[in-house]
Image (cartoon, helix red, strand yellow):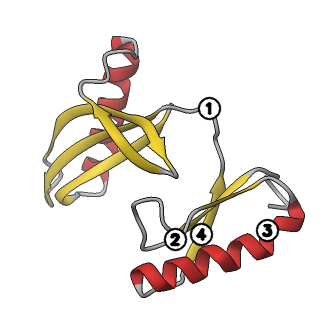
């Protein structure tokens, strides 16, 4: 926070579904919000570990589903927009993310493949982007 400033998002390290997440806009709220997020994460996931990242408020949330074989071969199953949310929980997924320009969609797909190929990803998973 000292280096990058506010606002930040505190997120449960082993979480999901919007649980264990807090937006912090003022320094005085940092410690209480971290404690609250950690407590919720522990109750929800059995692990209170949290991390802090820069909060990007007006972004669109776009995801790419990928499948990799662990040898650098990865395919994508196209992109979807998951920006319609309530309490950081996706309500609606729109596939394809037609309201983004095709060039943006293509870049997202290519970046998802570059990332997962570089680490020789093995599994089915999701690469998430804030646009």
In the image: residue 90, left or right of residue 69:
right
Circle 1 crowding by C-alpha within 10 Å: few under 14, some 14–19, many from 20: few
Residue under numbered circle 3: 30
Residue 20 image-quadrant placement: bottom right
In the image: residue 103, left or right of residue 80:
right
What number is the disc on residue 70?
A: none
* Residue at horizontal 28 percent and vertical 39 percent from the top: 64
Mark closer to the chain start, 2 or 3: 2
Q: Are marks 3 and 4 in contact (CB under 8 Å)?
A: no
* Cα distance in 3D space between marks 4 and 1: 21 Å
Residue under numbered circle 2: 12
Q: Dot 1 lies on which element?
A: loop
Foreground residue among 112 and 114 = 112
What number is the disc on residue 51?
A: 4
Counting labels gives 4
Residue 118 horizontal/vertical position (percent) = 30, 51
Q: Are marks 1 and 3 in contact (CB under 8 Å)?
A: no
Residue under numbered circle 1: 58
């Amino acid at each position: 926070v000292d280096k990058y400033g506010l606002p930040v998002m505190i997120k449960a390290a082993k979480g999901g579904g919007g649980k264990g997440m807090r937006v912090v806009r003022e320094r005085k709220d940092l410690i209480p919000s971290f404690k609250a997020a950690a407590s919720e994460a522990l109750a929800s996931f059995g692990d209170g570990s949290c991390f802090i990242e820069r909060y990007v408020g007006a972004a669109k949330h776009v995801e790419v589903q990928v499948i990799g074989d662990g040898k650098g071969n990865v395919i994508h199953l196209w992109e979807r927009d998951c920006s319609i949310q309530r309490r950081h929980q996706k309500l609606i997924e729109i596939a394809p993310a037609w309201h983004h320009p095709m060039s943006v969609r293509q870049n997202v797909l290519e970046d998802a493949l570059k990332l997962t190929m570089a680490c020789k990803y093995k599994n089915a998973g999701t690469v998430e982007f804030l646009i």
